Image (spheres, rainbow, N blue to C red):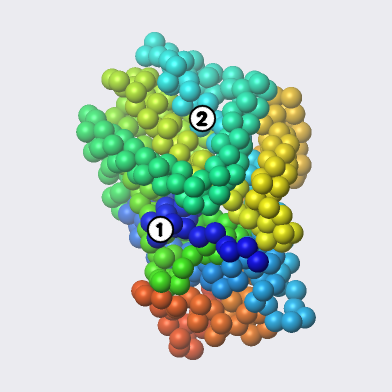
Amino acid sequence: MKERESFNSRLGFILVSAGCAIGIGNVWKFPYLVGENGGGFFVLLYLLFLLIMGVPVMSMELSVGRKSRRSGAEGFRVIEKQGTKWHVIGYISVIGCYFLMMFYTSVAGWMLSYFWKFLTGSFSSSMDKNAVASVFSDMLASPFDSLVFMAITVVIGISVCALGLEKGVEKVSKVMMSGLLVLIVVLAIHSMTLPGAMEGLKFYLVPSLSAVKDKGILSVVVAAMNQAFFTLSIGIGSMEIFGTYMSKDNTLLSESLRISLLDTFVAVVSGLIIFPSCFSFSVSPDAGPSLIFITLPNVFVNMKGGRLWGTLFFVFMSFAALSTVIAVFENIIASFMDNYGWSRKKSVIINFVGLLLLSVPCALENNLLKGITILGNKGVLDSWDFLVSNLLLPGGSIAVILFCVWKNGWGWDGYLEEANAGNGMKVPKGKAMKIYLGIILPLLVLLVMIMGLI
């Protein structure tokens, strides 16, 4: 059997894994939720749920990968008990990764398009709010723009993976993530020095009892729980693959915590970019795509040196999007290599064609396929997003938890042995922890799933 690829360094593993978790949602969703749900109170709850929900599930995904040295269905098949069918989880996870990329490549393409528009001067200080908003609507309405930038995203992601783990995924992700971290700090410092930035910081970070009261404490708790869980991209095997390339030098709880902290750092610092900038120019921050593609461009066109800052911001956004694309592409490619014995070259070629074709409907949703709905009144993109976010991610996470803890799966002892191998924080072996991970944690994730469906 061919020797399995591995990361060249521990830093490479941390940056690639964090790149998978760090995505577009870190930038627009987390800051808005913080401001909407009581500022500092939401941040504290988010960190708590990240620690007690996100980190343990990530350690379980990584443990399956590191123990089996296989991804997808083969990862579960190697360590499942004879006669059981836990490996079905692996097939579903690959389907989930495909559904994720079927819409994520289009959104990543929007980021690349806006980087190009700011770089080439499509935005100018003479533009009013309507003109800025029309840039976004015109981009969506153009089949050419949508398809081209989606295709560029797929080509970049697949080309990096074609180079292999060490020379492609790890090397490129190191550069990209290093650039991302530098850019986010530079952008945050600039935003916090703008006139009136302090009001934005207060809105973002100062606990607001009135906001919590207006929203309701239960609503704030559920919102924090949802964000803490979904921000790490766990449940569809996107972290399992990186476990297959890991050494046993460090415990998986420690590594999961480091990845989660880096993901949280990007989310928190993103708010330091967005809210001071918006309040400095008296622009209300909105949720969803309008924050990134309408609200912030309005800020940049009115800012001194706005073309430069807008270009840098969308370089940062493009890096965040592409880091996720590359990581998930690697998961898909490696899964086909492990499950069917394909060479990397064969898996790359076949999945390039598949990913490109399956991404076309989302790219055309707002133009040639406008008005087409799939789930109820949801369009193509929203339908795939709903399936991934509300069914596949939480459902897959529950399955992984049960597999790692229940005796008819891998089992508590097997998970503990693998997760605690190496130096660092270890999962406690007591009965209380087993009850929490085997019963309480899956119930919490089930709550997240039910709330998402509602």
Secondary structure under tag 1 reads: loop
Image vertical order of residue 71 relative to residue 430, above or below: above
Image quarter where the N terminus lies is bottom right
Nearest the eye: 255 or 141: 255
Q: Residues within 10 Å of mark 2 (few under 14, many from 20)?
A: many
Label 1: which residue?
9
Give the residue type at disc 1.
Ser
Q: Residue drawn at (62%, 63%), measured in percent from left and top?
A: 2
Corner quadrant of residue 162:
top right
Quadrant of the rendering where the C terminus is positioned? bottom right
Between disc 1 and disc 2, the foreground one is 1
C-alpha span from label 1 to label 2: 29 Å
Horizontal arrangement in the rendering, residue 208 relative to residue 394 (left or right): left
Q: Is residue 359 left or right of residue 204?
A: right
| Picture coordinates of residue 380, whole percent (x, y) | 71, 39
**Residue 13 placement: quadrant:** bottom left
> Which quadrant holds residue 80?
bottom right
Element at label 2: helix
N-term-proximal mark, 1 vs 2: 1
**Residue in view at x 48 percent, y 20 percent:** 117
- Residue 404 to residue 315: above or below: below
Question: From the viewer's perspective, is 383 left or right of 233?
Answer: right
Q: Is residue 109 visible?
A: yes
Query: Which label number is shown at residue 112?
Result: 2
